[in-house]
Structures are given as structure tokens and as C-alpha cells.
Amino acid sequence: MRVLLVEDDPMIGDSVRKGLRSEGFTVDWVEDGRAAELALDGAEYALVLLDLGLPRKDGLSVLRGWRQRDVGVPVLILTARDAVSDRVAGLDSGADDYLVKPFDLSELLARMRALMRRRAGRARDLVEWGDLRLDLLARTVEYRERPVALSGREFALLKALAESPGAVLSREQLEERLYGWGEEVESNAIEVHVHNLRRKLAPALIRTIRGVGYRLENS
């Protein structure tokens, strides 16, 4: 899952980015409001983690601008502002959740999972498609009741397909979800991941739609 982190404190930003990456997230980090607007205009994100006290343009103004343009990406505010009035302002401006600094990484991860469940209309951290079962909390996969060991990128690609059942995702869409800024992407990286998933799961589980992309088949 690709996340946009908007945080101007270098120590907090670096710590959050490292923590999220260790949990398998792809994280793009910007340090001011204008950069956040440009980032969201140029890429697709599953979630935004937004500080409020930002240079160039404050977080609430950025958030209000997104919501006025009907940008529906879930936004979790991360801020030191702990007054009730600040929480109300953040939520009324369009935030989906509000977390006060300092916070524990485990709580941040739990809130992120809750937002993703809400967006996907799920009550649990499970994605099931036919004989396939993904536990998003434990980051485990079962296929036909058999555990399957996957790499982080293989899990992320399979999750992207399983969360869009029946939809065709292009190579470019999958690359956007799996890789962040500055990461070198081999021209055949997605094809390699798909090949490995077919080998570990079932050859017919992921169908190639020639010239378009990939789709998860119900087998």
C-alpha cells in the first residue's frame, strides 16, 4: 500500500517512514503543504498522513482544498495540537481520523488499518477471494487452506489484485502501488512478481489481459 506522509519534522518523518516501510508500506515523504498538493496530483495513494503545522501552506488548508475538489483519499491527521477545538476543526475539514503526537507506531498502524477497512467496506483485516485468503494484519496468505510464503512485494501485488476483484490493473497502476519515489523499478519487475505468484499459488489464478494488465481469477 502506497502512503503519502506530510511531515516537516525530520526526526518524526524519518522515524514514521522507517516504521511503515518495515511493515511493508511504500512511503513517499514530503515536508510542506505545497509539496503535498503536488504529490497527490501526481500519484495515487491509499492514505495520507498529514501534519497541520506545515511550511508554505498549513495542513488544514491543504485538506480543505482536497475535499473541495472531491479528492476522496482517506486522511489521518498527525499533529501536536491536542485541544478539542483543534480535533473538531480537523475532522470538520474532512479528516477521517486524528492522532496526537507523540504516538506509538502500533497505534498509528491500527488506525491506518481501520481506515482501510472502512474504505473497503470490511469489518475485519481479511481479504478473501475464492480459495485465496489474505490476513492483512498478520501479512499472511493461505491458498486452498495451505499457507504460502510471499515476499513483501509479492504480498502487496496480490493484495492490490484481491482488493479489486474482477478488475484489471495495469502494470503502471501496480508499479504505483508497489514502488515509491527514487526506487529503481526494473522494466519487467511486475511480470517477475506475477510469475512468482503463479508459481507459488496457481498458474491460472492471475490472468494476463494482453495489452491491458492483470486480473485475479476466481478458482
Image (cartoon, rainbow, N blue to C red):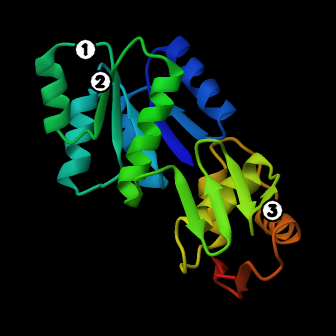
Say which residue appears at 64% left-offset and 83% top-offset: 212
Q: Horizontal placement of 73 versus 106: left or right?
A: left
What residue appears at the point 74 percent right and 78 percent down from the top-left corner?
Answer: 205
Amino acid identity at mark 1: Arg
Label 2 and label 3: CA atoms lie apart by: 38 Å
Which residue is disc 1 drawn over?
81
Q: Of the numbered discs in the image, which one, if any, rests on residue 52?
A: 2
The earlier-in-sequence mark between 2 and 1 is 2
Badge 2, how many Cα within 10 Å: few under 14, some, many 20+?
many
Identity of the residue furthest to the bottom in this view: 210
Total numbered circles: 3
Q: Which amino acid, by three-letter code, is at mark 3?
A: His
Q: Is residue 24 left or right of residue 152?
A: left
Dots 3, 1 in contact, CB < 8 A = no
* Residue that extends furthest to the front in the rendered view of this protein: 145
User: Tag 2's secondary structure?
Assistant: loop
Q: Nearer the viewer, residue 90 or 40?
A: 90
Whether 59 is drawn above or below 150: the answer is above
47 or 143: nearer the viewer: 143
SS for dot 1: loop
Residues 183 and 83: in front is: 83
Mark 3 surroundings: few (<14), some (14-19) or many (≥20) residues within 10 A: some
